[in-house]
Amino acid sequence: MTIKENSVHEKADSLYDEVHILGLELTQKNKVPGVAVAVIQNGKIAWIQCIGYADMASKKPVTTHTIFNIGSISKVLSAWGFMQLTEKGLLKLDDPVNRSLTRWTLPSSPYDVSKVTLRRILSHTAGLSVHGYGGFEQGTQLLSLEESLNGKTKRNGERVRLINEPGTKWDYSGGGYTLAQLLLEEKTKERFADYMKKNIFKPLGLMHTNYEWTKAMMASSATAYDTSGNPIKNRIFTEQAAAGLQTTVSDLAHFAELSIITNSRQLNSVLRPETIQLMEQPVLPSSNEGESGLGYRFLNYDNFRTIGHTGENVGWSAAMFLHLPTKSGLIVLCNGSNGDHVWYPIYERWANKVKTQATKVH
């Protein structure tokens, strides 16, 4: 089987060749049809490489315009929307969230509900429940945000509530982001997906990024594949802020550039550079389980500290790593449940290159 590969901005770069060989080998070995990889050097996209298939049956190749779901990386982009509300004066980072809610409020608790703030929600230190979401097959009628917060989208009926005293522990909570999604809708009186498209994605030039599967997006979407390599239906989510974003490797790589360089001209008044820099600082407390800024997570694979996020939904796997000191970045998008077996070896090669570069800089 020949696998088509196309590239943008190809450079004489040994990493490019290594990724090409790895990509071909790992996609076949792990029953992941396709992968798109973008590498950022000096704050700019150095190259993008697309390997394999967006769809196996039609042999449609992955391209820079192929749409992927990116799982929990959604949280990083949704955090830009929430932070924009703080810049507009609609929200304060340290105000009690419950006071701003009318459609649904956090249930009373032995813990202090008034300490649940946007800063703590975005950094996974708010003490909230619900780690993540599975979504539903496309075509299903989605439940409301209120029903999700009440546990109706979870098989075990787990609702969003306090399980720790806010501000005392890092504990990953997709549920917190669903609460923030409701908060944004209450404050703006707009649907979350519409607000994000109009106020974040369009002004940043992310024209193929959306929290909903529009008809146009479906036409250029990759097909999702399970662990056995069988095609499955796309997942859709009530909990869009936590897990429901679709995008292309080009769009996500551009977002990564903006996160690294924070150039006010390119940011087009979406956020101030200092807001993004604040989002990229750790929020205490952290724990052995994790550490976060606002939306961005601190990652430490192979003892190499980066910020970004990884994302896994059934049929999809994605990773975004940013190393701010060297202005380097890596984006990997896969249309298969085993995608972490594809992106991790690619990450290792990239991290080694950046580490070498970092020592040269010092």
Image: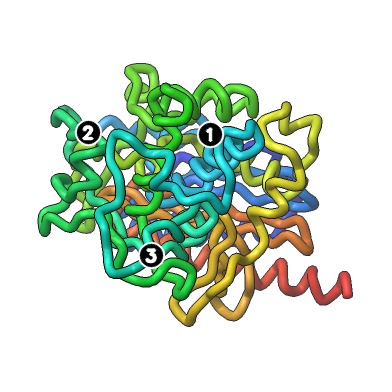
The secondary element bearing badge 2 is classed as loop
Tell me: residue 336, above or below residue 30.
Answer: above
The secondary element bearing badge 1 is classed as loop
Task: Give, as a three-letter code, the residue at label 3.
Answer: Asp
Select label 2 or label 3 by which is in front.
3
Tell me: residue 160, above or below residue 220.
Answer: below
Is 297 in front, or is 137? 297
For label 2, the residue is 144
> Picture coordinates of residue 144 (x, y %)?
22, 33
Task: Give, as a three-letter code, the residue at label 1.
Answer: Thr
Q: CA distance from mark 1 to mark 3?
A: 47 Å
**Total residue callouts:** 3
For label 3, the residue is 112
Q: CA distance from mark 2 to mark 1?
A: 33 Å
Pointer 2 or 3: first along the chain: 3
Task: Give, as a three-letter code, the residue at label 2.
Answer: Ser
Is 249 in front, or is 297? 297
Identify which residue is drawn at 49% across, 35% down.
248
The secondary element bearing badge 3 is classed as loop
Q: Residues within 10 Å of mark 2 (few under 14, many from 20)?
A: few
Select label 1 or label 3 by which is in front.
3
For label 1, the residue is 64
Residue 129 appears in the rendering: yes
> Picture coordinates of residue 28 (x, y %)?
34, 56
> Which color scheme did the rendering employ for the protein?
rainbow
Tell me: residue 323, above or below residue 208.
Answer: below
> Picture coordinates of residue 100 (x, y %)?
43, 39
178 left or right of 258 in image: left
Pointer 1 or 3: first along the chain: 1
129 left or right of 318 in image: left
